[in-house]
Image (cartoon, rainbow, N blue to C red):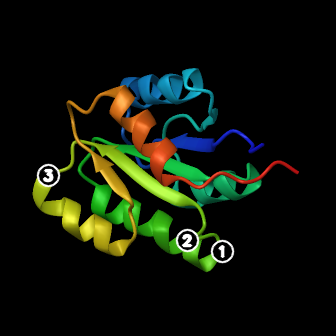
Amino acid sequence: MSEPIRVVVAKPGLDGHDRGAKVVARALRDAGMEVIYTGLHQTPEQIVQTAIQEDADVVGLSVLSGAHMTLFRKVVELLKERDATDITVFGGGIIPDADIPELEAIGVAKIFTPGATTQSIVDWVRANVPQKAAG
C-alpha cells in the first residue's frame, strides 16, 4: 500500500489573494491527499524548506501578481540546490499562455490557468505525481 500524496500548496511573493489556493488545497485534501497550506507571503526559500521538512511529493504554487516567472524559477532552482528534484512542481494563477512553455522548460510540470476545474487538478496530481511506498 502506498502513502497518501503529500502536497504543499503555497502562495509565493506579495500576492494577497488566496481563495483559489485554498479551494485547490481543499479539493486535494478531499481527494485523500495530505495537504500543507503555507499561507500568504511565502518566500521561495520558505516554500522549499517546508516541502523538504514535510517530505512533500508535490508543490503547488499560486501566483496572481505577475511575478510567476521569477518566483516559480526560484522555487525550482532551490529544489535542485537542495537535491530535491523528486518533488514535482505545478502552478496556477494569472499566467499568460505565452509564459507556459518557458515555465515548463525550467521544470514546472504543469500550469493551470483560470477556469481549470479542481477535478482536473486532482486528476493531474494523481496521474503525474509518484507516490512513496508505505514503510
Let me know if residue 17 appears in the view. no
Mark 2: secondary structure: helix
Distance from the alpha carbon under mark 3 to that under mark 2: 24 Å
Q: Hey, which quadrant is residue 92 in on the image? A: top left
**Nearer-the-camera pick, 34 or 17:** 34
Label 1 near label 3: C-beta < 8 Å?
no
Spatial distance from mark 3 to mark 1, Cα to Cα? 29 Å
Q: Is residue 104 above or below residue 23?
A: below
Task: List x then y, in percent, for residue 34.
Answer: 66, 34
> Can you give x and y, in whole percent of width and height, for residue 37 in the image?
58, 34
Mark 3: secondary structure: loop
Residue 5: where, in percent of width, then height?
A: 64, 42
Q: Secondary structure at mark 1?
A: loop
Q: Amino acid at mark 3?
A: Pro
Numbered circles on residues, count: 3
Residue that label 2 marks: 78
Of residues 126 and 8, the one drawn nearer to the viewer in this rendering:
126
Q: Which residue is mark 3?
A: 96
Q: Are marks 2 and 1 in contact (CB under 8 Å)?
A: yes
Q: Are marks 3 and 2 in contact (CB under 8 Å)?
A: no
Q: Is residue 50 visible?
A: yes
Q: Amino acid at mark 2?
A: Leu
In the shown orientation, is residue 83 left or right of residue 73?
Answer: right
Residue at 18 percent across and 61 percent down: it is 99
Q: Amino acid at mark 1?
A: Arg
Q: Which residue is mark 1?
A: 82
